[in-house]
Image: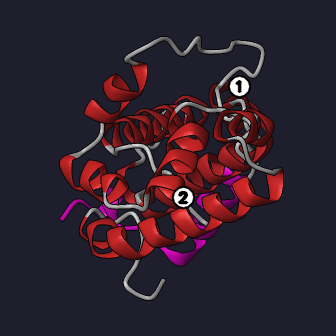
Amino acid sequence: MDKTAEKSPERSKEFEELVLEHLDMLHAVALRLTRNKADAEDLTQNTLVKALRFHDKFKEGTYIKAWLLTILRNTFINEYRRKSRRPPVVELSGTESSEEKSPDPEVRIDMTHGTREDLMELLDDRVKKAIESLPEDFRGAVIMADLEDMSYKEIAERMACPLGTVMSRLYRGRKLLRDILQEYAEERRVVSHTQ
């Protein structure tokens, strides 16, 4: 083994201090990449962990700032790719509001005839069957809130019932869906077995 590759405890401590000197710079770059404070903190931490774990890969004379930025960039890209391969997660807790779920609340989707069926066709067969198995009133409320992105008021007008009834139907419909789809969610690792 090459003697320069062996790291003494003093060398590791020096390296750690050298890496930590660049912490603010790494966080600033992570913030620009993620545009989210919590994600930037996670990205910075993951970069530091990787840099310290693989300090033996750092060659003397290498510009450490460029080395750290390469780790940060690669970590960001790998995390982005991993997230883009994972299907979007929709949590049906029964307590969330159905308003302003679209990425831009100023942009409304015009629901035209046949759109509900088109939206249902986009769902996985098991999810589609689970929704279709709901009692009619619950199914309608869930579809209008979670697929058609309608407000409680709009749903109440469409179903000709009070707001409280809409909220109750949504709560109960979502709870039934959670129960029906629990195993499906565990298989897809959307939820753990303990939830």
Q: Determine whether 4 is above or below 128 in the image.
A: below
Which label sits on residue 91?
A: 2
Q: Which residue occupies the extreme front position in the image?
A: 160
Which label sits on residue 32?
A: 1
**At 41% from the left edge and 19% from the top edge, which residue is drawn?**
115
First reached walking from the N terminus: tag 1 or tag 2: 1
**Circle 2: is it few (<14), some (14-19), or many (20+) Cα within 10 Å?**
few
Q: Quadrant of residue 108?
A: top right
The rendered magenta stretch, by its main secondary structure, is classed as: helix
Estimate the x, y position of residue 124 in percent, counting from the top left.
24, 45
Q: Does dot 1 land on a helix, a strand or a loop?
A: helix
Visible residue check, residue 94? no
User: Which quadrant of the rendered structure holds the N terminus?
Assistant: bottom left
Q: Determine whether 9 is above or below 160 in the image.
A: below
Estimate the x, y position of residue 154 in percent, counting from the top left.
74, 32
Residue type, label 1: Arg
Residue type, label 2: Glu
**At 53% from the left edge and 61% from the top edge, which residue is drawn?**
49
**At 41% from the left edge and 76% from the top edge, which residue is drawn?**
179
